[in-house]
């Protein structure tokens, strides 16, 4: 899978890797994949509150990512490759 065309996925994957949370992130995303659309809608519903803490652009990008199962799979694939890259 090629994630080079999605800068948001790259940014999130490298941020998660820098924090050392690749394995927990993969486990969390895999376990909650069936509920990802519900999570995206919850982010949109609580957006007025989340805007106080994070940029609106970030919350919109994250909601869009969670709503699209294909992009979520791309993020999981990218996290797997980032995990391998950081081990070497």
Image (cartoon, grey):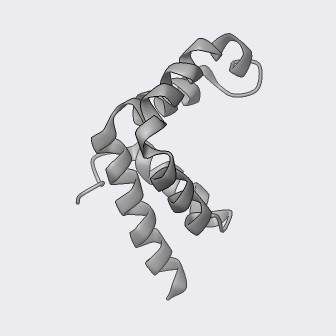
Q: Quadrant of residue 20?
A: bottom right
Q: Quadrant of residue 55?
A: top right
Looking at the image, residue 63 sits to the left or right of residue 3; the answer is right
Q: Residue at x 48, y 26 (%)?
A: 38
Vertical comparison of 68 with 87: above or below: above
Q: Residue furthest bottom?
A: 88
Residue 86, image x and y in percent? 53, 78
Which quarter of the rendering shows the N terminus?
Answer: bottom left
Residue 26, image x and y in percent? 51, 60
Looking at the image, residue 18 sits to the left or right of residue 38; the answer is right
Residue 14 in view, yes or no: no
Q: Residue at x 41, y 28 (%)?
A: 64
Q: Residue at x 57, y 65 (%)?
A: 22
Looking at the image, residue 77 sits to the left or right of residue 51; the answer is left
Vertical comparison of 55 with 62: above or below: above
Residue 66, image x and y in percent? 44, 35
Residue 74, image x and y in percent? 32, 52
Of 58 and 26, nearer the camera is: 26
């Amino acid at each position: 899978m090629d994630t080079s065309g999605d800068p948001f996925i790259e940014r999130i994957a490298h941020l998660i890797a820098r924090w050392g949370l690749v394995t927990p992130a993969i486990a969390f995303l895999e376990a909650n994949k069936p509920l990802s659309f519900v999570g995206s809608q919850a982010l949109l519903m609580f957006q007025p509150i989340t805007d106080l803490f994070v940029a609106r652009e970030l919350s919109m990008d994250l909601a869009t990512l969670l709503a699209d199962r294909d992009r979520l799979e791309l993020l999981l694939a990218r996290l797997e490759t980032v995990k391998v890259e950081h081990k070497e």
